[in-house]
Amino acid sequence: MLQSRNDAYIIEVDQHDAGVAIRDGNIYHFVAADWRYRALENRKFQHVDQVQRAAERLRGLMSLATSEALAS
């Protein structure tokens, strides 16, 4: 996570923009900038750090799936 503009935070994973976490009251919503992170859209998070961790976990799952596909 690099920058914040008021109540919006850019979520970066591996130096790529995954999307933006937008605060709405006490909840953060994720908007994907990269189609690979669409699975996180429309989910609600209590804290922006949760958005960051979810994006990192998703990236890890994508890497694992790619590695397994290459191994088969």
Image (tube, grey):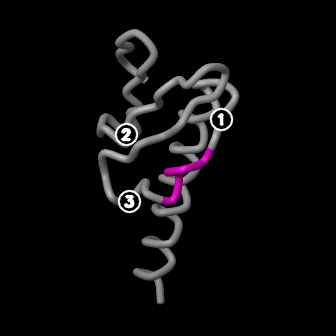
Residue 40, magenta (yes or no): yes
Residue 5: percent from left, percent from top: 35, 12
The residue that disc 3 covers is 36
Left or right: 6, with 68 as reference point:
left
Q: Main secondary structure of the magenta part?
A: loop
The residue that disc 2 covers is 19
Q: Earlier in the sequence, mark 3 or mark 1?
A: 3
Left or right: 67, with 54 as reference point:
left
4, 67: nearer the viewer: 4
The residue that disc 1 covers is 45
The residue at the point 41 percent across, 43 percent down is: 31
Describe the element under mark 3 as helix, strand or loop. Answer: helix
User: Does residue 29 sit above or below 39 in this rendering?
Assistant: above
Which residue occupies the extreme front position in the image? 25
Q: Which of marks 2 and 3 is nearer the N terminus?
A: 2
Distance, label 2 to label 3, CA atoms, is 10 Å
Residue 25: percent from left, percent from top: 61, 20
Q: Earlier in the sequence, mark 2 or mark 1?
A: 2
Report which quarter residue 6 is drawn in.
top left
Task: Point out the stretch of residues depicted in magenta.
Answer: 39-43
Residue 71, magenta (yes or no): no
Distance, label 3 to label 1, CA atoms, is 19 Å
Label 3 CA crowd tier, 10 Å (few <14, some 14–19, many 20+): few
Pointer 3 with pointer 1, Cβ within 8 A: no
Viewport quadrant of the N terminus: top left
